[in-house]
Each structure stands twice: as structure tokens, then as C-alpha cells.
Image (tube, grey):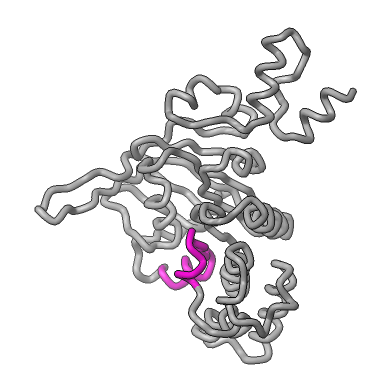
Amino acid sequence: MTPFLEIKDLTFDYIQQDGSTSRALSGVSFHVNKGSFTAIIGQNGSGKSTLAKYMNALLLPTSGQVLVEGMDTADPASLWEVRKRVAMVFQNPDNQIVSSIVEDDIAFGPENLGVDPDEIRRRVAEALQDVEMGEYRRKAPHQLSGGQKQRIAIAGAVALQPECIVFDEPTAMLDPKGRTEVMKVIRRLHEKGITVILITHFMEEAVQADQVIVLDEGTVKMNGTPGEIFRRREELEELSLDVPAPVRLAHLLRQRGIDVPQSVQTNEDLVRCLCR
């Protein structure tokens, strides 16, 4: 099966004001299968957000390749098709909202694609339902909470009907309630078949993925399932990364002689294990 997204030996250098270069990514290689849920983690400055911008050709490689369903993002002839397939949701929802009415904001993308008005109305209604914001369709975005604004930004991406959505730290600026709301929406979209790529620094979010990629100083340090990655607790700590709280607690319980499987990743896993 051909992967949905392939990144092959990707390298990128930023050009500084004095003409010197600073390497942000070096030899990054991995692939993402269609319909999967991939989380990318790493400390600040590891290259996560830079990497995200390659996935729909907002940046182009200094060397290497980024392929979306076999299309090279560096090929100008493929740019339109790549961006139809891969949508982006960024960290700050205020930077993504362009209209003074919620439903107008969600319609903005399809309108710019020349979608038929009747089809736009259908897409807006469906996107609002997907993010559970239908009752707010006539509200002004500034009247919404941070989590609600981010769900509107996600609805705007959904209305484009992409095959993949890249979320670049979408919960970083939200309170716990807002983070929970947004992650619920992301999981629902994944269940509907959308390929999800989530960049996050919350390990409790990363553990929900099928695949976890760990970046450090612009290189891939680990790549595997959440179970494989979060068992390497000491290596993660060396990279200044934590593990999900249930994984950490399970480790402490094992140290005290309690039989807790290595497979424990979530609160639900731990509760089931301790109540058996």
C-alpha cells in the first residue's frame, strides 16, 4: 500500500539576516498511512512546527522530498492538488478566523475554491455538526471561548473536505476543558476516516495516536506505536520529554511489586488493570 504521506531525507535550512544558515530539519524520513492518526512530539525548538509546514507545501525542502499520495510538494503542478488533500489547523485560533460570523468563517475556504453555494451550505452545516457548534452558527467568533474558537477553525478545515488535517499544537493555548473538547473533535474526525497528524507537547494526547514520532534538534529520534515509545521512559527524559501520567504511575507501581502490564497507556487501561 502506498503511504498517504512520505517524507524522504528532508532537510531544511533557515537563512539568517546576516546570510548565514541555520539547520531546522536534517535527514527526516517517515511515512503516514491513509486513515491513520500520527502524533509528533518534541521539546520546543525540535522542528515540529517547521515540519508541519511541509505537509501541504507551505515550505519547500532544501533537500529531500515530501510526497502526498505520490505527488511531490515541490512540483508547482501538484500544489493545488496537495493543498486540496491536506488542510492545516494552527495553534492560535484567532489567527485563522477571518469573518465576523461563525458560519461565514467556515464558508470562507469553500467559497475561495469556487464551490457551488448550495454545496457550501451543506458543508458548513455538516462541519458545524462535526465540531458540535451548530447552535453558534450566527454568533460572532469574539463571543466564543478559546476552545470554541479552535473548533470553529477545525470546522473551516473540515469544510474543505480534505483527506488529511495537520493540527499544529491546536490545544497549546487552551484550558483543560478546551483541550478536552478539541481532542474529542479530533478523535471523531479520525473515526470518520480523516488522516490525522497531531503535533503536540501533551503526552496524554500523543498516546491516543496510532504512531508517535519523536523529534529532537531537527532529527527523528524515535518512531513507533505509543506503547513502543512510552516504554522508553529514560530515553524520553534525556530528550526533556515526559510520559503520560498513567504510564508514569504504572512504572511506580511495578517498582513496588504490583503486577501492572507494560501495555498500560491511559487512565482507562490503568483502572481496568487495577480492578481486575
149 vs 118: above or below: above
Residue 206's spot in the image, x, y percent?
Answer: 59, 41
Q: Locate the C terminus and report the quarter of the image it occupies.
A: top right
Report the residue at 57% width, 60% height from top. Answer: 164
115 vs 48: above or below: below
Residue 45's spot in the image, x, y percent?
Answer: 35, 43
The stretch of residues the image draws in magenta is 79-96
Q: Which residue is farthest bottom? A: 117
Q: Is residue 72 magenta?
A: no
Left/right placement of residue 21 relative to residue 177 reads left
Report the residue at 71% width, 55% height from top. Answer: 184
Residue 267 visible, this angle: yes
Observer-nearest of 76 and 158: 158
Residue 55's spot in the image, x, y percent?
Answer: 45, 57
Observer-nearest of 102 and 80: 102
Q: Which residue is farthest top? A: 257
Residue 193 visible, this angle: no
Left/right placement of residue 216 relative to residue 222 reads left
Residue 167's spot in the image, x, y percent?
Answer: 53, 56
Report the residue at 38% width, 71% height from top. Answer: 77
Quadrant of res 117: bottom right
Q: Which residue is farthest left? A: 18
Q: Is residue 89 magenta?
A: yes
121 vs 14: above or below: below
